[in-house]
Amino acid sequence: MTVGILVVTHEQLGAQLVAIAKTILCTETTPVVCVSVPANISPQQLGKYADLIRDSMIAQDDGAGVLVLTDVYGATADNLARYFAEHCDARVISGVNLPMLLRVLNYSWQTLPQLCDTAVAGAKSGIQQYAQQAKE
């Protein structure tokens, strides 16, 4: 059993990140399911995407839990994922980026709590500030 991975983002951001990560890794990776939520989602569409996120979360859980990566904390995609995570064996991490996803895919054999720590560490280490000193 491995932790299921679900990426829930606005538009096609998650699908693009997964495609790039798989290209970089050049190997078969743990299956990742992506749910793309429209940036301008209407209240009438909300139920459709809520069902899609819930169903994807349930389908990804083979008994080891599900790691859900979302793009923006507090946005619709993240709120829906966090709502359904409370009813499943799932953890949600917002702020997905490519270094986070690469780390998750490289360490997908870990338990859900370990993989959460690995994801956050990967995201943080992938963000660096480079400041070139001005020439005098």
Image: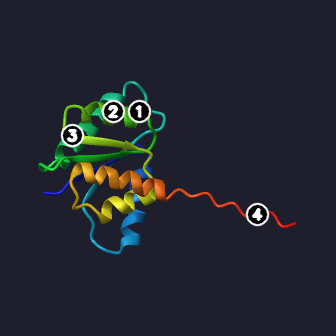
The answer to which quarter of the image holds residue 122 is bottom left
Dots 2 and 1: beta carbons under 8 Å? Answer: yes
- Tell me how far mark 4 sits from mark 2, CA to CA: 44 Å
The answer to whether 129 appears left or right of 34 in the picture is right
Residue marked by disc 1? 76
* Foreground: disc 2 or disc 3: 2
Give the image location of residue 109, x and y in percent: 21, 62
Q: Secondary structure at mark 3?
A: helix
Residue marked by disc 2? 80
Give the image location of residue 50, x and y in percent: 30, 33
- Tell me how far mark 4 sits from mark 1, CA to CA: 41 Å
Q: Which mark is residue 133?
A: 4
For residue 111, above or below residue 94:
below
- Tell me how far mark 2 sits from mark 1, CA to CA: 6 Å
Which residue is pictured at 81% across the width and 63% down the height? 134
Dots 2 and 3: beta carbons under 8 Å? Answer: no
| Mark 4 or 1, nearer chain start | 1
Q: Secondary structure at mark 1?
A: helix
Residue marked by disc 3? 55
| Mark 4 or 2, nearer chain start | 2
**Quadrant where the C terminus is found in the figure:** bottom right
Q: Is residue 110 among what the camera can see? A: yes
Kind of residue indicated by mark 4: Gln
| Mark 3 or 1, nearer chain start | 3
Dots 3 and 4: beta carbons under 8 Å? Answer: no
Find the residue positioned furthest to the top: 43
Quick one: label 4, few (<14), some, or many (20+) residues within 10 Å?
A: few
Which residue is pictured at 23% across the width and 44% down the height? 56
The answer to whether 61 appears left or right of 72 in the picture is left
* Foreground: disc 3 or disc 4: 4
